[in-house]
Image (spheres, rainbow, N blue to C red):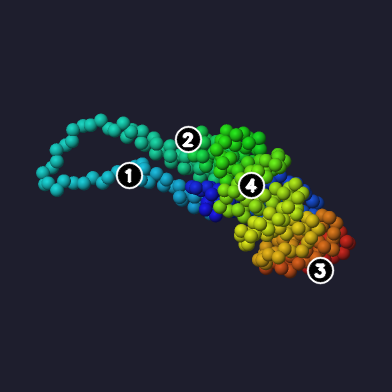
Amino acid sequence: MGDIFGSKSDRAAEQASITPAEVETQSAGQWSAVRADGDVVAAPPPMKDTPLEETAAATEAAAEEEAEPFGGVFGLLADAVGSDDETPPLAPLPQAPPAQSAAAPNVQAAAASLTRERARARNLTNQRQHSEAVDVWRGVVASGGSENDQLDLIASLVRSERWDAAEAELDRFPQARNTERGLMLSAIVYDQQERWQEADKAYADALAVSSAPHVILNNWGVSAMSRGQHEAASDLFVRALRHRPDFANAKANLALARGLTGDYSLPAVEFSEAEKAAVLHDLGLIAYRRGELDEAEQRFRAALETHPRYYRKAADMLLKIEKTRGGVADL
């Protein structure tokens, strides 16, 4: 999507993620919520793509983009050109250096330091060391960082589940609420505080300016699921898939929203074998938690048969069901 969530002009939304508050847990294990960057978290079931985090590859690419941010601005000097006259030129009279020349190295050093600190903060984020990343981003912002650095600080506060601090930073940076990324961060904070009307407005405002509506609609659907509004969530995931039919998170979330209403059938969307197996497994977990062991067993067996490799999670759940029944599973 036009990099509206980050990197130089904001990072790609689909490379972003955040662990939401746990709405439900269950004793048989937890259905998995795999964010777009591969983060697997205990969750309410849906997968939420939030504008917060980039993959290691995206970070590396962003670092390469920013490695030489001042080419053509600082440190480019014309080559010395000799005289065509064979007579050695007179030595120039001493002149006072331009007023800015003494400051230029300091400006370069400060800019290089900011670039290094940004890279360090992103590396900490990729390592899930979010509290440490907050400290680094605070330093970047205090050293004259950009508006996007301020948003990265807020994003790290959200990842650290420091909701009050994140809201305080949003209040200190009100222009953020006029950007897609800032609106998405605001919506996440409102979701955690169960300020549903404000969250809905933030999602709607973000959707109005988004170049990636499938991401906004998917996240809005996750918000609806966290409120127990599974049918409304399903509608939002369907809308997301109209914009991008291959969006894996929305496909999986649609199946889970239907499963939470008791409909364990797969929606009429195209899944890869691995995607289908994962969704069947998660539907089996929902049925298991509800005590519907026959339904759960069917889904786990289907997941085991569908996955292109041996699917240990599904096999483990089949063993658990057989132990519950006092039998032995034939795997």
Say whether disc 1 or disc 2 marks the residue closer to the N-terminus: 1
Residue depth check, mark 2 versus mark 4: number of the one nearer the observer: 4
Say whether disc 3 or disc 4 marks the residue closer to the N-terminus: 4
- Residue 132 in the figure: left or right of residue 318: left
Q: Label 4 amino acid?
A: Ala
Q: Secondary structure at mark 3?
A: loop
In terms of depth relative to the viewer, which is nearer, 180 or 142? Answer: 180
Say whether disc 4 or disc 1 marks the residue closer to the N-terminus: 1
> Marks 1 and 2: CB-CB under 8 Å?
no
Q: Secondary structure at mark 2?
A: loop
The percent coordinates of residue 90 (x first, y second) are 14, 38
- Residue 199 in the figure: left or right of residue 295: left
Write the residue at 45% across / 47% down. 66
Residue 137 visible in the current orientation = no
Crowding near pointer 1: few (<14 within 10 Å), some, many (20+)?
few
Spatial CA distance of label 2 from label 4 is: 32 Å
Q: Which residue is mark 4?
A: 204
The percent coordinates of residue 107 (x first, y second) are 39, 36
Q: Which residue is mark 3?
A: 330
Residue depth check, mark 3 versus mark 4: number of the one nearer the observer: 4
Q: Label 3 amino acid?
A: Asp
The percent coordinates of residue 215 (x first, y second) are 62, 53
The percent coordinates of residue 4 (x first, y second) are 54, 49
Q: Which residue is mark 1?
A: 76
Q: Which residue is mark 2?
A: 144
Q: Label 2 amino acid?
A: Gly
